[in-house]
Structure formats: C-alpha cells, structure tokens
Image (spheres, helix red, strand yellow):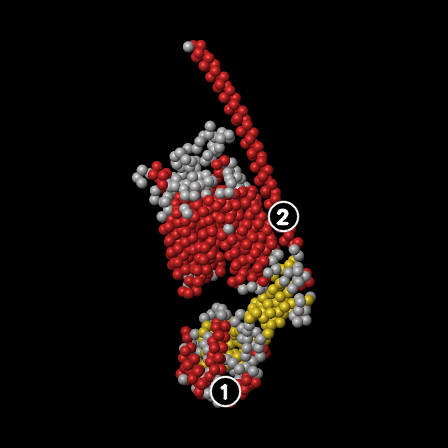
C-alpha cells in the first residue's frame, strides 16, 4: 500500500522501468510533499552556499594585507585568492565520489572541518607557501567536499521544484557577498590579517552544522550503495548530452566572471568616481541574488521546459555582455550592470537544476562534480584573458565583446541538448534513477515508446 | 626664435625644437652643458611638469614650460628689471653666468626652469591658491594673469610679496605679471603672493613646498612574535635618503638598523619606496613611527601607527563561534533523533490501527461468508 511508512514513498519523477514518465502526476496518497528534513536541507545548503562562496571571496579581499605582510609581489599573492577557487572546482568530482560512497552528510561535515582547519592554519603562516598550502589547498579541498554533496542533495530532495530550491540555495552566495563588503575590512582593521583569518576559520566551521542538516534521504533505492564511482564517472564521460552540457558551461564560465572581476575597473575607465564604482558593483551583486530566486521560481512550475529557460537566460546574459561596452555614462553603465547581474544570477540555479534534466537524479552528484571540474578551466582562464585583451587593445570593449561571444556560444550548445526541442512531455526519459546506472544508458527505446513521431 | 617667447604660450614641440637648437648652438653661459644634458633637462622638466600637474587646483590654470633661460623676449623688455639684487636677473648674461656657476657649484647638474601661471578670477575677496611641489633646486617663474574680460580695470597696482618682503616683478604682458626665482635651498620655499589693487583687491598665493609623504591613516595590526612591515612611498619624486623614527614618549628617536640588526631591517625597495621591517614584535613596539624623506630642498615626514596585539584578542571570539557551531550541530542531531522517534511512534500507531482494521475486516468477511454459506 503506497504511502504507509512500511513501503517506501517513491517521489514522482523518478523513472522506474515499466512506469510511465509523467511529471506532475498526482502524488501517491499519503506521501509527504517532500521527504522529512527538506527544510533542514534547504537551510543547510543555503548556509553552505553562503559560506563556501563567501570564504572564497573573502580570500580575494584579504589579498592586499597578506601581500603587504609578506612583502610579496601582487602576482604571487594573487594565487592565494585563486588557488582555493581552483581547488573548489577541480575537487568537484572528488566530492561527488566520496559522497556517493559514504553519503552526503558525513562528507560535507568533514569538508567543513577541513576548510575551517585550512583557514586556521593559514592564520599562523610564516611564509607565503604556507598560505598556498593551508588556504589554497586544504581549505579549497574542504570547500569542494561541501559544495557538490549539498547541491546534489538539494536536487534529490526537491524533484518537483528543483530549480526553485536551487535558486533559493544559491542566493545564499549573493547574501554573503553583500555582507562581506563591510565585514572583511572591519575584521582586517580590528584584528589584522591573522586575526581575520582566525575568525573566518571559526565562521567556516559552521559548515559542519550546515552539513549536519543534510539528512540522508530515507529511500531505499536511493541509499548510498557499494562503490559506484568508477562506473558512474566513466559513464558520464561517455554521455554525449552531458559532455555538451559541461562544454556549454565551460564556455559560459569564460565569459561569466568578466564583468564581475573587471567591472570596477571598467567603471573607472568611463569616469565614475570611487563611490559610484562601489554602487555599481554592489547593485550588480544585489540583483544577482534576486535573479537567482526569481529564475528558480519561474522554472519550478511542473510543466516548464527548464532547458529552454536556461537557454534564454544564458543568451540574455551573453547579449547584455555584448552591449556592456555601450555603457559610457554612469546611468547607462548602472542599467546594463543591473541587467547583467540579474541574468547572470538567473542562470546559476538553472545550471545546477538542468544537470538533473540531462543525466537524471541518480548521477546528479557525480555530474555536478564533473561539470565543476570542467568549468574550472573556463573560469580560471576567463578573467585573465579579458585582462590581457584589455592590455592589448587599451580598453575593455573587446574584453566584454569576447565575454558575450563565449556566453552566446555556450547558449548555442544548450540548444543541441536532447531535451530542448521536444519539451518535457516528449523528452526522452533521463536515464534510470537508481544508483547503478548502466554505463551506456539506452535513450532510444523510451524515446520510441513515448514519441510516436520519431 | 624670439617669436616663440613673445608672451604667447608656445607649442611644446616648437619649444623643444627651439630649446635643442639654442642649446646645441652653444652659448657663452654654459660651457659644461652638452646637448645630452639639454635633452636630459628637457626630460626632467617634462616629468616634473607632469608631477606638478597632478595637483588639483580649483581655478583654471595654465602651466607652460620654458626651459631656455638665455634668450627670453627682447632685451628691451627686461631692462625694466632694474638692478635689484634680490631677484637674480637671469636674463642679463653676466648675472646668468654667475647664477649658473653658483648652481654648478652646488652640484645641480640638471637644472630646470619651470613657469607656473595662475589665472585670476577677477572677483574681489576670493584668494586663489596654487600648490607647487619641488624636490630639487629649480628656477621658477610665477606669474599672475588677469583674464582679458577684466582688462577694463585700470590703474591696477600689482605687488608680489613673500611674507612682508616685496619682490620686484616683471610685466610679462599688459595683463600678466611675474617674478622669477631660483629655489636652491629650503629657505626659499614658502608662500609667495601676488596682489592686484584697484577698486577691488584680487590676490593669488603660490605655495612652494617639498613633496608630501604618505604614511598610513589606519593603524597596522600585528601580533606578538610576528614581523611587521611598514611601507612609505613618495609619489613621483625620488628622495635622497630615508630615515625612520620611533616615538618614545614625546621624542623621536632615529632607528639604526645596523645597530639593532636582528630587530629592525630597513630596505629601500625602489627609489621612492622604503620598508621598515620590525622582527620579534613585543608590546613595547606598539606606537607611532615616522618615515622621513630627505630631498634637496628639505625634509618631509609620514606617520604610521603600529598596534601589537596578543593572540588572546581574536581567540576569544574564535572560541565563542566554535562553541556556537558545536551547539548547533548537537541541536540538529537531537532534533533529528526526536523527530524520528515521533515518526516511529506515529508509524507504530498507524500499523496497530491497520492491523486492527485487517483483523476486523477478516472477522467481518468470515461472518459474511458464513452468512452467505447459510443463505446458500
């Protein structure tokens, strides 16, 4: 009898052989709308997005006093800021593999301990290399172990409203970004960089609490089973649509960060004074958060073609980036920056929710991790490339045009994904939602079964 | 060539051309100056010009560069200079030679001559101020110019003053007046003013000073046992020497890094940047430090403050936050255990009810079937 505590409550949308794939079908009676602990998962994941993104950004903001204290050149110190970001993204697959094996919760909690420990050790550094190892490697690794399990768990807990849930969660990053602006200088001025790192370590330890909230999903066929990581990851590497999806976001990441990283300098270039520059950047960060929630909400309704929404937001972001060089007055630049911030924020939750559309819930965590790893190449190259273009051409026009071009290229790749043109009803069912996916899921038979026109 | 210096502002390229031509031709006044020196001085004056232009001034000003102090205008203009020895009359060849020799004696090999002009606003009561930064000996011409629209003002009495001392000036054009100065040492710096007295009084002040050094407004925070690095920069100008001072009570004591080599290290990172590294900090190192840059024309100081904290200071908030984390995690797990128990109890009750229902259905069914049997 469905719905009784004795039999598992299978969430709708999970595809089991033989049952029709009908999203939005009525829930079996008695089945809770979301598994218990859903709110906790949302809260925990929100906190984790805030702390991970905040931690990485905080490192960037602390760079100047760090450099001054060690008397190092700007280039050497910059690595302390970019190494944790690189570790976070490259460590994605590791986070996925470990959490599939041991469960999301323990891995996320350990990740919290590691990242806090990394920052703690960084506070006692006596040499720049100590900082690379502690803040860069250890904390970055810890953050990687938190990030993918959290997002994956959110995806599994909220199959019907995945994009809204993801949007709410990733908006945590915007909140922490806005809070860090005044907080980091305050910490630096009161406690110096060592004390600031110490307190950031303590704040980062809250990730352990965030991880504790990721209650394992009490559904037997989703429970973490024997090690699947090798087949799962290798299978993903052969999965055409996933590779295209990941490549799309590599391209997106090349362009995505350019306005955020170079925006302040561009505002200076067109003649804004310090106060106005700060206003433009803060406004962009603020609407970023709004965009995340709104886009998540818009795409969360049952029959929405998520991939189409994603395409629209990515394309809009690219177009805005192309038009950004036209903003030569404060008002013009502000308007364009607001538009860019909103669209850029909008695509974030849809990017993560879209992964489930492409590979299914069973391999969600793996896919997120692998995608993050691929993305790291894009994000690490993007901003320096734009900076180089600026040095070569003399202003940021070409940099922003290039960023927009990459974003649009990514959006075009999204068009090629299988679920795009057929809408949700006729889309091929994502590969089975069990933790033992066959290495080459056969999409053909379900498509034939459901879409007579093929 | 004289046309280039007729009082209208010459174009820079023309100026450079004239300058190189005039100096390469050689002149009786500079046997030691070679064309290379000339171009060097051009470069020097150009860079100093840019340094000067960095200051922001409220009123529209024009700053031109004249580097040829030999042939300026026609001799007749300058006969009015008189023989006032207080101004070096640079334009008279014999005095020029004298001044140059004096400058040469003082080891100023790349002497420049820069002109600063101020446009007077024409409104009485307001005083216009211009800051001029000088780091090494230079020849200066300060001029005050009255905008053409005010040239209707007649009978203007123009005075140039420094403090109480009046300086003889030249009428450069019919509505501009200037003085020329050799600034060779600190005593010549200060404020020079030009005053136009007619129906109203209009004045302008030129403030000649050494370059300012920037310290740090916010205190530098460091910890006991740590190393602190203090940085002082001079923007655009190269000091001859840097000295660091620490304050003990109300006096300033110079820091001798060779004497206390394991405590203080002074590094001159580049021409205009100096670092003071203090090792093995203790509470006594807390306080105010000064970095002093010595220029040819004087000294300039920047202030920095160092605060030395003990590790206990951030440790307390650290432990507080870690305690909060532990409490949060405990609450999360306790709540989960509690809610699981609640579910299990609810589940047990439901199960009990279902079993009861089944039992009653069974018994009903049995009765029905037996009833049916009986009927049949």
Q: Residue at x 51, y 40 (%)?
A: A226
Specify the label residue A22 is tagged with: none
Please state which of residues A207 and B168 is positioned toward the viewer in this rendering. Answer: A207
Q: Is residue A435 above or below residue A340?
A: above
N-term mark: 2 or 1: 1
For the question of whether residue B302 can be seen, the reply is no
> In the picture provided, is A256 more to the left or to the right than A128?
left
Please state which of residues A430 and B81 is positioned toward the viewer in this rendering. Answer: A430
Q: Residue at x 38, y 58 (%)?
A: A401
Percent across and percent down for residue B29 are 49, 88
Q: Chain of mark 1?
A: B
Q: Is residue A13 above or below residue A230?
A: above
- Give the quarter of the image for residue B242: bottom right
Q: Residue at x 41, y 78 (%)?
A: B13
Q: Is residue A366 above or below residue B195?
A: above
The CA distance from mark 2 to mark 1 is 76 Å
Percent across and percent down for residue B145 are 46, 76
> In the picture provided, is B216 more to the left or to the right than B28?
right
Q: Chain of mark 2?
A: B
For the question of whether residue B322 can be seen, the reply is yes
Q: Report which residue position mark 2 lands on.
A: B320
Specify the label residue B30 is tagged with: 1
Tell me if mark 1 has few (under 14), some (14-19) or many (20+) residues whose alpha carbon lies within 10 angstroms of its own: some
């Amino acid at each position: 009898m469905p719905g009784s505590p004795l039999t598992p409550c299978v969430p709708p949308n999970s595809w089991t052989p033989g049952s029709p794939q009908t999203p939005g079908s009525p829930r079996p009676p008695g089945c809770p709308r979301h598994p218990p602990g859903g709110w906790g998962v949302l809260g925990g994941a929100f906190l984790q997005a805030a702390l991970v993104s905040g931690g990485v950004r905080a490192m960037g903001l602390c760079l100047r006093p760090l450099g001054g204290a060690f008397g190092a050149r700007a280039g050497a110190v910059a690595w302390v800021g970019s190494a944790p970001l690189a570790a976070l993204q490259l460590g994605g697959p590791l986070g996925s593999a470990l959490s599939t094996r041991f469960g999301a919760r323990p891995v996320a909690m350990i990740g919290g301990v590691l990242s806090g420990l990394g920052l703690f050790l960084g506070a006692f550094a006596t040499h720049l290399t100590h900082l690379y190892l502690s803040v860069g490697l250890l904390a970055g690794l810890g953050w990687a172990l938190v990030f993918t399990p959290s997002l994956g768990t959110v995806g599994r807990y909220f199959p019907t409203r995945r994009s809204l849930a993801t949007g709410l969660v990733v908006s945590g990053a915007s909140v922490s970004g806005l809070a860090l602006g005044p907080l980091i200088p305050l910490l630096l001025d009161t406690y110096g960089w060592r004390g600031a790192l110490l307190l950031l370590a303590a704040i980062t330890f809250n990730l352990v609490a965030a991880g504790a909230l990721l209650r394992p999903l009490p559904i037997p066929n989703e429970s973490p089973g024997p090690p699947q990581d090798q087949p799962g990851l290798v299978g993903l590497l052969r999965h055409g649509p996933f590779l295209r999806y990941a490549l799309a976001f590599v391209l997106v990441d090349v362009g995505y960060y350019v306005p955020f990283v170079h925006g302040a300098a561009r505002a200076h270039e067109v003649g804004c004074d310090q106060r106005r520059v700060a206003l433009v950047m803060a406004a962009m960060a603020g609407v970023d958060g709004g965009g995340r929630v709104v886009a998540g909400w818009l795409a969360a309704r049952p029959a929405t073609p998520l991939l189409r929404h994603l395409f629209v937001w990515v394309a809009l972001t690219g177009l805005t980036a192309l038009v950004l060089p036209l903003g030569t007055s404060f008002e013009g630049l502000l308007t364009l920056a607001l538009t860019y911030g909103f669209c850029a924020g909008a695509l974030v939750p849809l990017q993560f929710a879209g992964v489930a559309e492409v590979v299914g819930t069973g391999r969600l965590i793996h896919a997120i991790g692998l995608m993050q790893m691929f993305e790291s190449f894009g994000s690490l190259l993007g901003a320096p490339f734009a900076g180089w273009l600026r040095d070569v051409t003399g202003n940021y026009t070409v940099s922003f045009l290039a960023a927009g071009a990459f974003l649009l290229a990514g959006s075009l790749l999204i068009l090629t994904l299988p679920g795009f043109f057929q809408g949700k009803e006729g889309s091929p069912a994502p590969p089975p939602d069990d933790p033992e996916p066959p290495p080459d899921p056969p999409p053909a038979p379900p498509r034939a079964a459901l879409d007579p026109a093929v | 060539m004289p046309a280039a210096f007729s009082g209208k502002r010459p174009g820079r390229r023309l100026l450079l051309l004239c300058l190189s031509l005039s100096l390469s031709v050689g002149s009786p006044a500079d046997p030691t100056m070679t064309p290379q020196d000339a171009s060097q001085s051009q470069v020097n004056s150009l860079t100093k010009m840019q340094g000067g232009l960095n200051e922001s001034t409220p009123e529209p000003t024009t700053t031109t560069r004249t580097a040829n102090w030999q042939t300026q205008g026609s001799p007749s203009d300058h006969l009015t200079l008189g023989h006032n020895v207080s101004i070096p009359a640079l334009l008279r060849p014999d005095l020029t030679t004298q001044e140059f020799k004096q400058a040469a004696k003082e080891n100023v090999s790349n002497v420049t001559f820069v002109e600063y002009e101020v446009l007077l606003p024409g409104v009485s009561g307001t005083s216009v101020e211009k800051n001029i930064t000088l780091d090494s000996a230079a020849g200066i011409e300060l001029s005050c110019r009255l905008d053409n629209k005010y040239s209707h003002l007649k009978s203007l009495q123009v005075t140039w003053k420094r403090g109480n001392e009046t300086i003889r000036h030249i009428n450069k054009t019919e509505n501009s007046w200037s003085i020329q100065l050799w600034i060779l040492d600190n005593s010549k710096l200060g404020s020079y003013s030009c005053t136009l007295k007619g129906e109203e009084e209009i004045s302008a002040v030129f403030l000649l000073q050494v370059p300012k050094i920037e310290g740090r407004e916010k205190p530098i925070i460091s910890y006991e046992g740590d190393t602190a690095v203090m940085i002082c920069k001079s923007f655009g100008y190269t000091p001859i020497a840097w000295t660091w001072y620490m304050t003990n009570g109300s006096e300033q004591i110079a820091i001798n890094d060779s004497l206390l080599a394991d405590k203080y290290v002074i590094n001159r990172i580049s021409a205009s940047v100096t670092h003071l590294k203090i090792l093995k900090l203790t509470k006594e190192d807390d306080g105010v430090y000064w970095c002093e840059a010595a220029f040819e024309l004087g000294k300039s100081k920047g202030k920095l403050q160092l605060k030395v904290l003990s590790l206990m200071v951030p440790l307390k908030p650290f432990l507080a936050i870690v305690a909060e984390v532990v409490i949060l995690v405990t609450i999360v797990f306790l709540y989960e255990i509690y809610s699981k128990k609640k579910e299990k109890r609810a589940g047990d009750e439901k199960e009990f009810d279902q079993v009861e229902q089944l039992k009653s259905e069974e018994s009903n069914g049995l009765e029905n079937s037996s009833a049916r049997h009986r009927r049949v």
